[in-house]
Amino acid sequence: PVINQVLCHISNTPEKVIQYSQEHGLLVEAYSPIGHGAVLKNPDLQAMAGKYGVSVAQLCIRYCLQLGTLPLPKTANPAHMKNNADVDGFVITDADMETLKTMPTIQNYGEGAGFPVFGGKINDDGTLTRRDFVKRD
């Protein structure tokens, strides 16, 4: 394998999985970097995005890039595609990156809540404990 696609966004940052993958030469592809849209109305993220003069979506995509992942935002809207691609004009500070890493986990993704996702963990010795697909609650 050369790519590990994981759910990764502000409020859900699987740092151990990212580190493990990168240490083993895998590109980490972050799907749903905008948190299924659930983060767009977060007032703290709106304020931080305003500080950088960008949209919340751009902040989310830049966050994933700075983690060393390849964000994969989904949209069929050409204006959103253009906006999503325009993330090179700013850098999130280290302090703000730490704030974003510790945002509360999204508890309800709405329609995405029933989507089956891989459940597992990386053990301290680097081995993987895998559970088959689980339903997010």
Image (cartoon, rainbow, N blue to C red):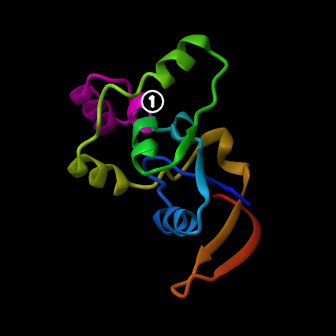
What residue is shown at x 52% (from left), y 61% (from top)? 18
Q: Position of residue 40 (x, y in %)?
A: 44, 31
Mark 1: amino acid: Ala
Q: Position of residue 50 (x, y in %)?
A: 26, 26
| Left or right side of 43 for 112 | right
Residue under numbered circle 1: 57
> Which of the two residues, 41 or 100, is positioned nearer the viewer here?
100
Quarter of the figure that contains the C terminus: bottom right
| Left or right side of 11 for 107 | right
Residue 32, placed above or below residue 11: above
Q: Position of residue 101 (x, y in %)?
A: 36, 55
What residue is shown at x 51% (from left), y 48% (from top)? 69
> Which of the two residues, 110 or 102, is positioned nearer the viewer here?
102
Furthest-right residue in view?
A: 132
Residue 100, placed above or below residue 78: below
Q: How many marks?
A: 1
Q: Quadrant of residue 121?
A: bottom right
Q: Which residues are magenta?
A: 40-60
What residue is shown at x 46% (from left), y 36% (from top)? 61
User: Residue 52: within the magenta?
Assistant: yes
- At label 1, counting other C-alpha atoms closer than 10 Å, the crowd grade (few under 14, some 14-19, many 20 or more) is many
User: Residue 54: within the magenta?
Assistant: yes
